[in-house]
Amino acid sequence: MPEKLSVVILAAGRGKRMGSDMPKVLVESDEGPLLGLVLKTALFLNPSLIALVTGHKRELTDAFVEAWKKKNSHQVVVSSVVQEQQFGTGHAVLQALPILEKAHGPVLILYGDVPLLSAETLALLAQEHEKRKATISVLTALTSRPHGYGRIIRKNGELAAIRESKDCSAEEQLIQEINTGIYLVDSSFLAPALRGLKNENSQKEYYLTDIVEKAVSEGQRVCSLLAPDFRECIGVNTLEDLTEVNAILRSQRIAKFQRAGVTFCDPTSVNISCGVTIGTGTVIGPNVQILGSSALGERVRIEGTALIQDSTIGADTILKLGVRIESSIVGAHSTVGPFAHLRPETILAEEVKIGNFVEVKKSSLLKGSKVSHLSYIGDAEIGAEANIGAGTITCNYDGSSKFRTVVGEGAFIGSNTSLVAPVEVGKGATIGAGSVITKSVSEDALALTRAEQREIANWSKKKKRSKGS
Ligand code: UD1
Ligand code: CA
């Protein structure tokens, strides 16, 4: 990169078209406020300073920037300037001139609502600007849906002007090369050009874009660089644009995981939050959401239709169809599902098996334990290698308080047992099927509360006979 750049970010607008009263640049994308994404890209260019033009509800924008600065302060100076009333993009940059006075090199102007620009494209623009000794360099892009963007007007192939959508003739509306809103401008040209702007247009605004025509009329060198992909130049004016930006961010995250060895059976149906980490060799089926601060180990297999929120999944674990896991830890070599629900504060050690239609809440299950079918385990500690039979329920709630159940190592809980907490089942103990356990059970004992079976011989035949009479 040549001389150090100064960066101006325009962030004063309200964004009426978003249907919100927030400053538009604070609108949340999947990866945080739009302005955060623009600031991150600006940092990559190692600028000498960043001037941020704020206006509508600027106290909110300033608070965001203060927090951002705390995280990045060692890298660059960010100064806010106020544009009291939003008279247009040209008027906005004008407010930043006092800060830019010390700037000698080129000034990079970024719009706070264009969040996906890559630092590579901006570096390319800076190189071109330097190489061609331009006064202004404009980043343009090609799109089949140019509506709403300023159009690039060329004469004999040379950039002559930028015409706003609302000011375009019917013929100009057809132009598919658009203004991305990103420019490099020599500081000596910028100040007088801004001071000379007029607001004689359909919106009665001072358009920054008019400095291009001015430079051309003065015989200055004006260059343009075509962005490699329109998608990185999307301006967020409407909620529809925001949805498009989020879809692009999502597919970029998935592409990054694919490059790191994660397989997606149907990437378009998968949503992975930006803080998530996934180990190599992991295979993710269709319709899966992995959200918050979740972390998946290596070679995890997720069959599909799953939601994992703020949870850790150990290596080689299989999540079968239809699991929901929240704020939990699942150890390595475990199996969960199909159709299982791990609620917050569930901790599964290694080689644990949670089978179909099992719900676990705030419980620890130690190594090799199994809850294979139709159970509820809440506020419990299940020892290593313990086997919890089908339909077992921890009765952890008496209507006002919660109580704990402890099942010792290697214990065997017969099917359809109710463990009425607080209760403890000793190591190696066995509970007979269908028991309601209300008292603690000693190590290696057998406990059962089942009512004794009675048998009345030929009862059915007698019943039929009495009906017939
Ligand atoms: C602008 C460009 C258009 C370009 C498009 C690219 C102008 C006149 N038009 O149009 O050529 O194709 O961006 O996305 O520049 N802002 C202020 N103060 C103001 C007005 C705007 O700070 O007085 C800020 C906004 O917060 C926003 C940015 O400038 O971050 C762009 O403003 P916006 O109104 O969205 O411009 P567009 O109509 O999209
Ligand atoms: Ca815009």
Image (cartoon, helix red, strand yellow):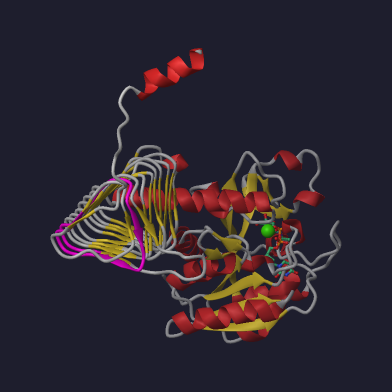
Considering only vertical position in the picture, is 69 above or below 176? Answer: below
Give 5 or 390, whichever is nearer the viewer: 390
Q: Position of residue 236 (x, y in %)?
A: 64, 56
Considering only vertical position in the picture, is 196 above or below 66? Answer: above
Give 145 or 332, whichever is nearer the viewer: 332
Q: Which residue lies furthest to the top in this view?
A: 468
Q: Identify the residue at image location x=67%, y=62%.
A: 219
Q: Where is residue 73 in the image (x, y as percent from the top left)?
A: 46, 84
Please say whether residue 269 is one of the residues in the magenta stretch.
no
- Quarter occupied by the N terminus: bottom left
Q: Which residue lies furthest to the front in this view?
A: 469
Would you identify the image quadrant in which residue 98 lies?
bottom right
Give 105 or 433, whichever is nearer the viewer: 433
Image position of 435 (left or right of 86): left
Image position of 48 (left or right of 434): right
Residue extent of the magenta highlight: 407-430
Evaluate whether residue 188 shows in this view: yes
Q: In which quarter of the image is ligand 1?
A: bottom right
Would you identify the image quadrant in which residue 266 lies?
top left
Q: Where is residue 388 in the image (x, y as percent from the top left)?
A: 26, 51
Q: Identify the residue at image location x=47%, y=18%.
A: 466
Q: Identify the residue at image location x=41%, y=59%.
A: 343
Please say whether residue 415 is one of the residues in the magenta stretch.
yes
Image position of 118 (left or right of 258): right
